[in-house]
Amino acid sequence: MGLRRAAVISVAAVAMLAGGCAGAARPRTSATAARGSVGSITVFAAASLTGAFTDIGAAFEAAHPGASVTFDFAGSSDLVAQINQGAPADVFASADAANMATLATAGNAAAAPVEFATNRMEIITAAGNPRHLTGLGDLAAHDLIVVLCAAPVPCGSYAERILAAASVAVTPKSREANAKAVVTKVSSGEADAGIVFATDVRAAGAAASGVEIPQAQNVVAAYPMAITKQSANPTGAQAFVDFVRSPAGRRILTDAGFGPPRS
Amino acid sequence: MSLEARVARTMGSLQLDVDLCVGDGEVLALLGPNGAGKTTLLRVLAGLAGVDVGRIAIDGTVVDDPLAGRFVPAEHRSVGMVFQDYLLFDHLRVIDNVAFGICARGASRAGGRAEARRWLERVGLAERADARPPQLSGGQAQRVALARALATSPRLMLLDEPLAALDAAGRAELRHDLRTHLGEFGGSTVLVTHDPVDAFAIADRVAVLEGGRVTQTGSLDAVAAQPRSRYVAELVGVNLLRGEGRGGVVRTTADVAVVAADAPDGAVYAVIHPHAVSLTRSAPSGSSVRNVWPVTVAEVGRLGGRARVRVAGPVPLVAEVTAAALAELDLRPGDEVFAGVKATEVQVYPA
Amino acid sequence: MSARRTRVRPPAVVVGLAAVAVAFFALPLAGLLWRAPWSSAWHHLSRPGARQALRLSVICSLWATALSIVFGVPLAWMLARRAMPGRRAIRALCLLSMVLPPVVGGVALLFAFGRRGLAGQFLDRWFGVRLPFSTAGVVVAETFVAMPFLVITVEAALRNLDPRHEDAARTLGASPWYTLRRVTLPAIRPALLAGAVLTWARALGEFGATITFAGNFPGTTQTMPLAVYLGLESDPESAVVLALAMVAVCFAVLVALRDHWYGNLRQPGIDG
């Protein structure tokens, strides 16, 4: 993990420099001057962003000496509830639009949220796909143990939408509390298949395999982020949001399995 | 012989090595200081522990013999045990405590209770049948414990200081009851105590256990008359000296000559009763007192009309004087006085 | 007389700190009561899902308590009475699940009793038994987490019990088994009951190990805590009502048991 992250960070740093030289962006000196005021920021991010944002945070700190980023990774709905209760977040990165809307409705978003990544759903199965699953239709097999996320969490509602749209009737053995729990059940061999985000399959590494769901049947999960109303450091927060959307940030997100934002 | 026991067992620093025989209907009192191994011996006899080497037979049935590979555990020996602190089962009513052993041996609950009620009547506690043990006085609790043990019709009764936890009144009453019930009991009894009064009241015979070994055995009178250890001497309240007898004089281990009326030659014990020791401020001259030693008063204790004075000197002694004599002498610790003993008051017997 | 009364009164510091402790426990409950949607409470509770979860919770926690007693009492007895080699290590092992984060405990249970687990693969292959995603799996997870409470309580009670009572029983002709049933267990009854209640309460509130090992499916493995947790995501009002229902059940049992539990300790003559 450490090694991999170090590699990602160095790639990101090189990309940054390359971007800086090749693009029409600002010369480094003025960028450094702007970085001086970044300070410390706290980012509340959806659990599915854990790997990618940890790497982005490290790259961000490397690019902005003196900056420090603290993350709180949890379910999007938990995070919204905490922010609405006054938790000190500068930036909120959600795994879906609904939870971001909750934040906005409560009047706790400083500006309109921006989409920074997309995610799509994938079938996750044991490493090597021993049951030879090819698509959603196979999940209806009687002897297949399928687990899905519970309806209230995004991966659960997406899975339901996808299955409904494909007219596949699946009786899951369990409605897990989050996508990671589905991954655990599948990678430990307890369940034969589940539906999770493509990024979850990527994060599981060799412990599990993914079966892609065709674009036509799939949903696109948009990841919006916003600076919170109560942010004590809106400048630093904006710098982080910009960094996530920069080529360097995007590259890390792509490596983690995220798609580019729409539009 | 109903109980024949040859017991050798090492427990920590204690090395128990005892031969005991107790006949049918006989009560043997086991006297001894703390740590002498009395309780350990009872546990071994009960089958709660085993011998390392030896053999125990109850009514001719061998219950413990390591060489023969035989060990009968407590629950299969016909033994009744009574403990100093009763060890009644607090969660059971009195009647069920007494019925416990009967039921444990397979009787029905009703049958056990009927038998238990008869035993409660015998110990005079029928009206307390439904009480809980914590509601009983010490004496009542111990009578229940006695009934509980006897109700199983044991062949051997073991009593571990049954009177030690009681106050003086309860003790006298229970001592009487024990004598009655153990007198009616047909099997053998071993009673552990460190009060010679109990032994005298209840037991037929005494064995003195010191440091894991029996140092004296016989009737209480015989043991009291010729103590063979400091423990027994203090128990019966006499001064005990040890020495070499030759020509009517006993030379003690501290090399003091004690003149005795009829001392045998060789290693001997000499006993001097405290009331035979006279204390005077000045050396008696020309009296019949053959033994006079200058001593220092160490301790003065009064008990009713009499006083016991412990003196230190060539021969450490306890003297018993009347309160009047004590007042006249005005003895205080540290006073230098003379202790005198007549030759005829020194009893000497071979060691 | 007044001097005596002064001595009996506890120090002000003790009273103060105890009051803080009570407030500490009372306030979260007050918070739940404050936020509870009383007008719609019955509606939330009478939904089949809620009733199902409550029923499953009660059944599974009682099973877990029963299993804890059946296996935990002998374990406590061995720990208290037998000088086994490595007794401390065994005790530490058996109490491990108290310190293990429950979710980790659940993962460990998967590795042990799951379909591909150390023991689970044989359960599956030989007997066709699969614990995950089954109600039996919920009972296993709850027992794993809750049994140490019983073992600790009963072992402490056994240690405090004078073993000579058992000696006395044996000299009366009672076999070790009879002695255990008629003397030892009744003597530790208050502790056994207290331990069973603790175990039951812990099993009732068990969440992490259950959802990780047994999963979450209404009617099969979704107990109250799982329903409450997932309800917080979608329907916080319902979650609060369900949580309060759980608290009420637990509270009722603890209060009802109290007399029973102390009744045995309170002896005339000892108690004033």
Image (cartoon, coloured by chain):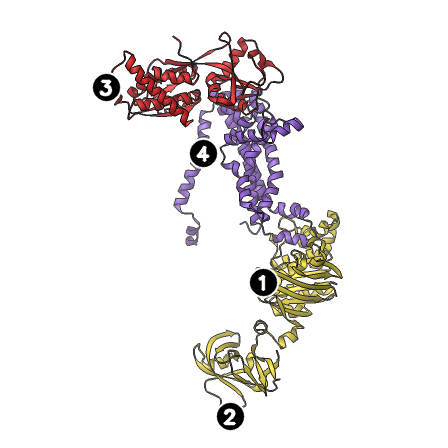
Chain colours: A red, B yellow, C purple
Disc 2 to disc 4, how far (Cα)? 94 Å
Dot 2 crowding, Cα within 10 Å, few <14, some 14–19, many 20+ = few
Between B183 and A212, the one lying in front of the other is A212
Which amino acid lies under the numbered mark 2 shown in the image of this protein? Gly
Disc 2 to disc 1, how far (Cα)? 52 Å
| Disc 2 and disc 3 on one polypeptide chain | no
Quickly name the residue at label 4.
C26
Between B337 and A172, the one lying in front of the other is A172
Report in which chain the residue with disc 4 lies. C
Q: Residue at x 66, y 63 (%)?
A: B7
Q: Which mark is residue B14?
A: 1
Discs 4/1, front? 1
Q: Secondary structure at mark 3?
A: helix
Discs 2/3, front? 3
Quickly name the residue at label 2.
B286
| Disc 2 and disc 4 on one polypeptide chain | no
Work out whether residue B100 can be spotted.
yes
Disc 3 to disc 1, how far (Cα)? 89 Å
Q: Earlier in the sequence, mark 2 or mark 1?
A: 1
* Total numbered badges shown on the rendered structure: 4
Report in which chain the residue with disc 3 lies. A
Discs 2/1, front? 1
Report in which chain the residue with disc 1 lies. B
Between B65 and B326, the one lying in front of the other is B65
Report in which chain the residue with disc 2 lies. B
**Quarter containing the N terminus of chain B:** bottom right
| Disc 3 and disc 1 on one polypeptide chain | no
x and y percentages locating residue B123 in the rendered image:
69, 59
